[in-house]
Image: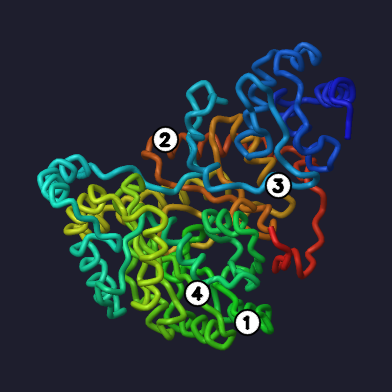
């Protein structure tokens, strides 16, 4: 551990003799020192003004450097207390879902025109939301006068969800549906119900960050497998889980929230066989089912499995508004009964107001989904066109749906370092490691394309400007130690998080 009062100043002073933007030199140097353990977790960095004076730079330089590190969750800046390192030696602090949803765009701007947030992938609220809230007011009051609460959800909404699954090729009775306070609550409840205490949690890399939050909170034993995008990978995953007792799988077969991949019917059959043969159970996250760019060609995974082995999670956050907090679980009645008892212990029932507003809007679900998909497709085309023009070295697979692009940077690139520099350039992006349980994909970014067209265009322009500076840096991967691609690095380990 280094003496920050002297050694840090000396190291930074030496680096600042090099050419380059000063705030980037400071942030890159600090990131390097944190990763190799010379600045330990929990250490407090010098106050911004004090460090600026010692280095002979402006306070703004240090403020921008610290803000860059905060944006990638390496630094915790506490008002009135100081700035503390949150990472463990050699690796950044494990990211959390709240890091992408706690107002990144509202933090102290690192750009004269403010920060453009391309790390998020949830679209803006529907324009019809205001009218839906108004039109349901009388019905809300009428139900309030009845003083009744359906823990399992309002009957009409459960019937709508059941009919929606039935139309998609998965016959469903309303008694098989539980309405939850958002899909995240449904995910928390279903994984808590299904996972045996010692059973491994099998997740893809990448996967949904909210699921990783749950696994870490419960200190679950994670097994990470590469994204299940083809039969070869599914077969490899089967070998990896062989011998495990009742593994719990978390998958997104209809549309992956990170990569946008939709699993074809044949692959869903293979995955169903894997779950059955392993004696496992599965949670299938269906949140983007109505956000595919082409019509759905396969029924949900539950149609291929003994229904006692699968719970399907869905909700309205990507279609309507995440602030409604309306989600659902689809499962056999025996499991629904257990889940209702669990929900009763949590909150007694989902907001009646939110359920009725959602129900009003869902009467026009097909029309709304078509508009959402058209908008997403247009913004995806804009994003990929600008990336090809300005960052031709970047690679990606065209997504089948969703609101984000999973981008691979050129060999040797360090996404975390680039993301820190991008914040200095006025744009926030999510690094690949954020969405993995095993620290892989350090050379990937997830780019959300939900911002208004003008902001998206400007954000990508700022990203290109940052990449031009980063790409011209001959030592661009110097802050990340070389990684050995051992089986544990590829597949993840069995260690509890």
- Residue visible at 54% across and 35% down? 427
Q: CA distance from mark 1 to mark 3?
A: 31 Å
| Left or right for 352, reference 247 | left
Residue 289 horizontal/vertical position (percent): 36, 65
- Colour mapping used in the image: rainbow
Residue at the location (27% across, 57% down)?
A: 369
| The N terminus: image quadrant | top right
Query: Nearer the N terminus, badge 2 or badge 3?
Result: 3
Q: Residues within 10 Å of mark 3 (few under 14, many from 20)?
A: many
**In terms of secondary structure, where does tag 4 sit?**
strand
Q: Which residue is mark 2?
A: 455
Locate residue 348 relative to residue 421 in the image: left or right: left
Residue at the disc numbered 3: 414
Q: Earlier in the sequence, mark 1 or mark 3?
A: 1
In 3D space, how far apart are the residues under numbered discs 4 and 1 (Cα atoms)? 14 Å
Q: Nearer the viewer, residue 240 or 145?
A: 145
Rendered view: 87 above or below 487: above
Tell us which disc is closer to us: 4 or 1.
Answer: 4
User: Picture coordinates of residue 158 (x, y %)?
Assistant: 24, 66
Q: Residues within 10 Å of mark 2 (few under 14, many from 20)?
A: some
Residue shown at 63% from the left, 39% from the top: 72
Question: Of helix, strand and loop, which one carries label 3?
Answer: loop
Label 2 vs label 1, nearer the camera? 1
């Amino acid at each position: 551990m280094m003496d920050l009062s002297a050694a840090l100043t000396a190291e930074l002073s030496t680096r600042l003799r090099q050419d380059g933007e000063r705030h980037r030199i400071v942030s890159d140097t600090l990131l390097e020192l944190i990763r190799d353990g010379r600045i330990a977790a929990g250490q407090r960095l010098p106050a911004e003004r004090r460090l600026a004076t010692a280095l002979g730079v402006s306070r703004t330089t240090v403020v921008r450097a610290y803000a860059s590190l905060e944006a990638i969750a390496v630094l915790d800046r506490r008002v009135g207390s100081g700035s503390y390192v949150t990472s463990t030696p050699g690796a950044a602090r494990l990211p959390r879902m709240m890091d992408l949803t706690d107002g990144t765009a509202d933090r102290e701007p690192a750009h004269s025109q403010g920060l453009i947030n391309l790390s998020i992938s949830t679209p803006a609220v529907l324009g019809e939301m205001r009218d839906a809230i108004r039109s349901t007011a009388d019905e809300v009051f009428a139900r309030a006068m009845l003083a009744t609460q359906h823990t399992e959800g309002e009957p009409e909404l459960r019937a709508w969800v059941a009919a929606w699954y039935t139309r998609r090729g998965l016959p469903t009775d309303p008694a098989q549906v539980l309405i939850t306070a958002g899909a995240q609550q449904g995910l928390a409840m279903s994984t808590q119900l299904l996972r045996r205490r010692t059973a491994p949690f099998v997740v893809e890399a990448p996967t949904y960050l909210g699921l990783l939050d749950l696994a870490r909170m419960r200190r679950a034993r994670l097994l990470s497998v590469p994204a299940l995008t083809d039969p070869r990978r599914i077969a490899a995953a089967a070998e990896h889980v062989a011998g495990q007792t009742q593994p719990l799988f978390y998958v997104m077969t209809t549309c992956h929230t990170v990569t946008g991949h939709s699993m074809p019917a044949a692959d869903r059959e293979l995955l169903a066989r894997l779950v059955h043969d392993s004696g496992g159970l599965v949670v299938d996250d269906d949140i983007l089912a109505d956000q595919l760019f082409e019509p759905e060609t396969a029924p949900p995974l539950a149609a291929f499995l003994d229904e006692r082995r699968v719970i399907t999670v869905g909700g309205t956050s990507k279609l309507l508004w995440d602030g409604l907090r309306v989600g659902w679980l689809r499962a056999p009645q025996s499991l629904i009964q257990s889940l209702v008892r669990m929900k009763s212990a949590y909150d007694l029932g989902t907001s009646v107001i939110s359920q009725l507003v959602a129900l009003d809007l869902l009467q026009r679900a097909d029309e709304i989904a078509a508009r959402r998909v058209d908008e997403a497709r247009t913004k995806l085309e804009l994003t990929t066109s600008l990336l090809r023009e300005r960052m031709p070295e970047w690679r990606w697979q065209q997504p089948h749906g969703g609101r984000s692009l999973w981008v691979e940077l050129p060999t040797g690139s360090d996404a975390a370092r680039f993301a820190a520099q991008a914040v200095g350039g006025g744009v926030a992006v999510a690094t690949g490691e954020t969405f993995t349980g095993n620290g892989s994909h350090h050379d990937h970014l997830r780019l959300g394309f939900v911002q208004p067209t003008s902001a998206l265009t400007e954000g990508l322009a700022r990203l290109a400007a940052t990449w031009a500076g980063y790409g011209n840096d001959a030592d661009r991967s110097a802050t990340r130690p070389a990684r050995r691609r051992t089986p544990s690095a590829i597949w993840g380990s069995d260690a509890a998080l």
